[in-house]
Image (spheres, rainbow, N blue to C red):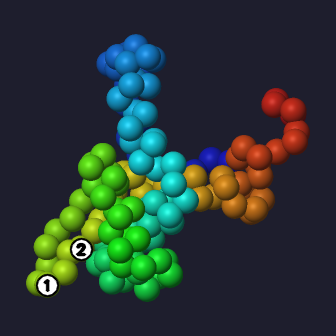
Amino acid sequence: MSQDLGVRLLDPDGLASAAGQAQLLAPQLKALSDPNRLHLLLLLADGPRSVRELTELSGMSQTLVSHHLAPLREQGLVTVTPRGRSNVHALCCEALAGPVRLLATLASLTPEGADACCSDRPIGS
């Protein structure tokens, strides 16, 4: 499966050691480790939304949506912009939308997802 995600990959030569990378990445992955947070990120991958819109689309309460947006904001994965009497949340950058959508594809039961990672076929066949 070849797909252009519109993501610029980091130069591995310019990065810290693998242990250093893991230390930097772990808090962000922890913020993503909750299904409700991933649900919100998938909704935000389609474009910026208010808490009210996220509440309606996700079926979560306003309190729960706000609760789960907080760690995403703290880790810099989601931004918030005041607009009138509400706040509009968005992914930190458009580059994050591609990987979020890819994760959803990999986890789904589509042929693309199965071919990408969830196959019983031995590697290289």
For the residue pair 14 and 30, the one nearer the viewer reads as: 30
Instruction: State the residue in front, 76 or 105.
Output: 76
| Residue that carries the numbered disc 1 in the rendered image | 85
Contact between marks 1 and 2 (CB within 8 A): the answer is: no
Q: CA distance from mark 1 to mark 2?
A: 10 Å
Residue at the image point whose x is 28% and y is 55% from the top:
73
Mark 1 residue element: loop
Q: Position of residue 123 (x, y in %)?
A: 81, 31
Q: Residue at x 50, y 81 (%)?
A: 59
Q: Is residue 77 shown above or below 69?
A: above
Front residue of 115/33: it is: 33
Q: Count up the numbered dots.
A: 2
Query: Could you say where residue 71 lies in the image, as x and y percent from the top left?
Result: 33, 53
Residue 66 in sight in this render:
yes
**Given the image, on which type of amino acid does mark 2 rest?**
Val
Left or right? Give the position of 63 relative to 19: left
Q: Give the residue displayed 46% in from the left and 60% down from the top.
A: 37
Dot 1, crowdedness within 10 Å: few (<14), some or many (≥20)? Answer: few
Residue 105: image quadrant is: bottom right
Residue carrying label 2:
88
